[in-house]
Image: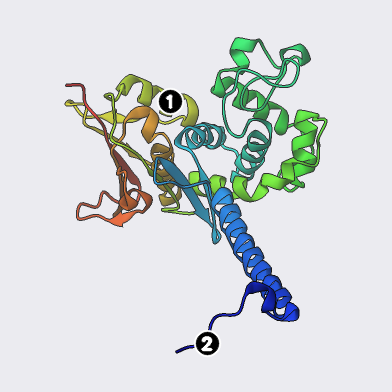
Amino acid sequence: MSSPLPLAEEHPPARRRLGCVAAAIIVAAIVAVGGYAGLHWFRSGMDLGGPVCHATAGGETVTFSPEQMDNAGTIVGIAMGRGLPARAGTIAIATAIQESKLRNINYGDRDSLGLFQQRPSMGWGTPEEILDPEYSTNTFYDVLVTVPGWENGVVTEVAQEVQRSAFPDAYGDHEREGRAIASTLSGHTPAGLVCRLDAPIRHTETEDLVGDLERQLGLTATVSADSRTLSLTLGSEEQAWSVGQYLVAKAERHSITAVVVDDRSWTRASGPSGLTWLPTDDPVGAHTVTATLTPQR
């Protein structure tokens, strides 16, 4: 017959203490690993498999919601339409992330409003004007281009010259995100901007889409007679990628289901395929962009 197990109080005290210490270390390690994983999950955009957009440039990937990337498309698109360098987009995006998290919000500190938290009382415009993303973005650039040396200046210092914020050091915290988004949307980084989206729930308002392209990018698009395809012929491959990735950023707003640039295509999907540009069997040429729209039934 085997020997009876000793009672708890018969265990050597030192061994018990060592066991408790070891258990505590193991628990602490599990908590630390879990905390790190949770922090990584939070910083990477809390991707739970729903709609999301990524911008990848220079080995950096940043993650935002379709709403945020839509606003980013407006901000960088207007910079391109005004003939400004990608650096302008970087500064504007970094500023908007700090001020509003890239959302067109109707509240803020005191009377601050919109993407850039501009204040009517400080002469930025009426509340209605400031809450128009195109207006607020253009007014931001109107001031930016008057700042001496803005093209090569430090993001924090240049943005502060425009915004006159009470927290001037915060803008530089978002330069990495601003650079990745601006690099893709300006066309410097091809095939870097993607969005995973659910199926469209409404048809494409072609007049709204064509109007956005004209007002923001200064471009004229052609829409097919059946309202299924939009096409543009651009002056360079870089501009084609700028427009193509702008259309992906605007895909949720305008119910776009596919974009083709040269020999690569992005196809709207709620799964992993929505997060990549793939080779296409029907290339359109290095200077051409096409978008597949959702026609009215």
Could you tell me how far apart the alpha carbons at marks 1 and 2 are, in whole angstroms?
84 Å
Q: The C terminus appears in which quarter of the rendering?
A: top left
Where residue 236 appears, as percent x and y from the top left, is 42, 48
Camera-near label (1 vs 2) is 2
Report helix, strand or loop for mark 1: helix
Q: Kindly tell me whether residue 31 is visible in this rendering.
A: yes
Q: Nearer the viewer, residue 240 or 185?
A: 185
- In the displayed structure, would residue 294 be above or below residue 122? below
- Picture coordinates of residue 272 (x, y %)? 34, 52
Q: Nearer the viewer, residue 110 or 119?
A: 110
* Position in image of residue 64 (x %, y %): 51, 42
The dot on residue 212 is 1
According to the picture, the residue beneath numbered tag 2 turns out to be: 3
Q: Residue at x 29, y 51 (%)?
A: 285
Q: Relative to 170, is 183 on the left or the right?
A: left
Q: Position of residue 158 (x, y in %)?
A: 76, 39
Query: Could you tell me which secondary element the residue under label 2 belongs to?
Result: loop
Q: Is residue 209 above or below residue 234?
A: above
